Image (spheres, grey):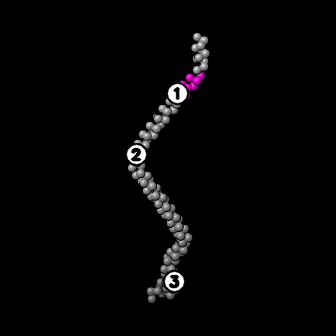
């Protein structure tokens, strides 16, 4: 029995290390095969949906271009409105004066006419009736 124990002691660690390394190698191979299988499955799905992906990408690019164009248009419109507000706010006093003058001059003409006629008219109604 002593020979068996001595023999066992001599081969125990190399055998144990070999078994552990074999187990780890098999585990690594199994995991790698599983990962390649998943990758192959994903590649197959990608190939099946490739035309849809390309279509969606072109639609996305189209919509992004439209969005950019709309943002540019919106900015231009806002700038135009701001410019119009500036022009109107600076032009309103002039326009208000022109409006006032349009209403003032006919009234002034009427006032001058009445003033002139009132000076020429007699001051008493009896004199006017003559």
The answer to which quarter of the image holds residue 20 is: top right
Residue 102 visible in the shown view: yes
Mark 1 Cα within 10 Å, few/some/many (few <14, many 20+)?
Answer: few
Q: Which residue is mark 3?
A: 112
Q: Is residue 73 above or below residue 128?
A: above
Q: CA distance from mark 1 to mark 2?
A: 36 Å
x, y percent for residue 90: 56, 70
- Locate residue 79 relative to residue 58 in the image: left or right: right
The part of the chain drawn in magenta is: 13-24
Residue furthest to the bottom in view is 130
Nearest the viewer among 27 and 89 is: 27
In front: mark 1 or mark 2?
Answer: 1
Name the residue: 45% across, 40% down.
39
Q: Earlier in the sequence, mark 3 or mark 2?
A: 2
- Quadrant for the C terminus in the image: bottom left
Kindly identify which numbered label has been placed on residue 23.
1
Look at the numbered disc 1 and give the secondary structure of its residue: helix
Residue 107 visible in the shown view: no
Q: Is residue 22 above or below residue 50?
A: above
x, y percent for residue 79: 52, 64
Residue furthest to the front in view is 3
Q: CA distance from mark 3 to mark 2?
A: 94 Å
Q: Which residue is mark 2?
A: 47
Look at the numbered disc 2 and give the secondary structure of its residue: helix
In front: mark 3 or mark 2?
Answer: 2
């Amino acid at each position: 029995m002593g020979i068996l124990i001595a023999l066992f002691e001599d081969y125990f660690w190399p055998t144990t290390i070999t078994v552990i390394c074999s187990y780890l190698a098999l585990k690594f191979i199994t995991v790698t095969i599983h990962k390649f299988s998943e990758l192959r499955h994903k590649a197959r799905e990608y190939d099946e949906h490739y035309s849809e992906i390309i279509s969606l990408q072109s639609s996305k690019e189209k919509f992004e271009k439209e969005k950019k164009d709309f943002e540019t248009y919106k900015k231009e419109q806002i700038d135009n409105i701001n410019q119009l507000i500036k022009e109107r706010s600076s032009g309103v006093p002039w326009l208000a004066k022109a409006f006032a003058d349009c209403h003032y001059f006919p009234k002034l003409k009427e006032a001058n006419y009445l003033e002139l006629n009132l000076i020429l008219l007699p001051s008493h109604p009896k004199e006017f009736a003559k």
